[in-house]
Amino acid sequence: MDIISTLSDDLLLKILSELPTKYVVASTILSKRWKNLWTMVQKFDFDDNFELEPSNYGSFLKCVNRSMVFHKAPVLETLKFKVGPCCSYEDITTWITIGMVRGVRELDIRHCNADFKDKKHSLIKLPNSLYTYEKLEVLKLSYAVILDVPIDVCLPSLKSLHLVRVVFKSNQSHRRPLSGLSCS
């Protein structure tokens, strides 16, 4: 018997939480015990390697959607996405919405495009529902994310906000995330 099989489920989940999600899901082939263990991982880390080919992005999309649907942990602590130009508003909105339903506490989105000159495809907008999500504690947004922050922003649990090379839709938008920290 191998040593890893003797570890407790809690320790295995901790180990799996540190891996990219595609490897976590791949672990299901190791044994019957591991088949459903991945569904209890509290951290998802998805990386499409800034895919430029829509056909390759399709398999990434399928992996993310299946992982999000089959997830069974009571809380999804961390949800990370590193996505490229193929990622659409609809995709990111769906994933963020599922994450909110699963009680996500930390959201990290890195969006990169090889050609930032093509503004239509280089910026990704976030759903308005994110700006009123009460359980969010950490929000990290990086590269080519456009922030169209609504007036009624309310993020009472937000403890940490990381913005790296984001674009604000208007001059007023950059003040709104901070004003929403003490909403009534």
Image (spheres, rainbow, N blue to C red):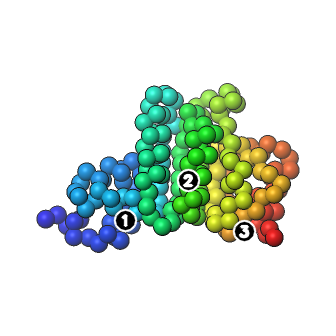
Residue 36 horizontal/vertical position (percent): 33, 59
Residue 151 horizontal/vertical position (percent): 83, 54
Q: Residue at x 68, y 61 (%)?
A: 133
Disc 2/disc 3 C-alpha distance (Å): 20 Å
Quarter of the image with the N terminus is bottom left
Label of residue 57 in the image: none
Q: Residue at x 72, y 59 (%)?
A: 132
Q: Quadrant of residue 90?
A: top right
Specify the amino acid type for callout 1: Leu
Q: Secondary structure at mark 2?
A: helix
| Left or right placement of residue 161 versus residue 81 in this view | right
Residue 105 horizontal/vertical position (percent): 58, 64
Residue 174 horizontal/vertical position (percent): 80, 52
The residue that mark 2 highlights is 98
The residue that mark 1 highlights is 13
Specify the amino acid type for callout 2: Ile
The residue that mark 3 highlights is 156
**Disc 1 to disc 3: CB gap under 8 Å:** no
Q: Residue at x 76, y 46 (%)?
A: 148
- In the rendered view, would you say 157 is above or below 28? below
* Of callouts 2 and 3, the N-terminal one: 2
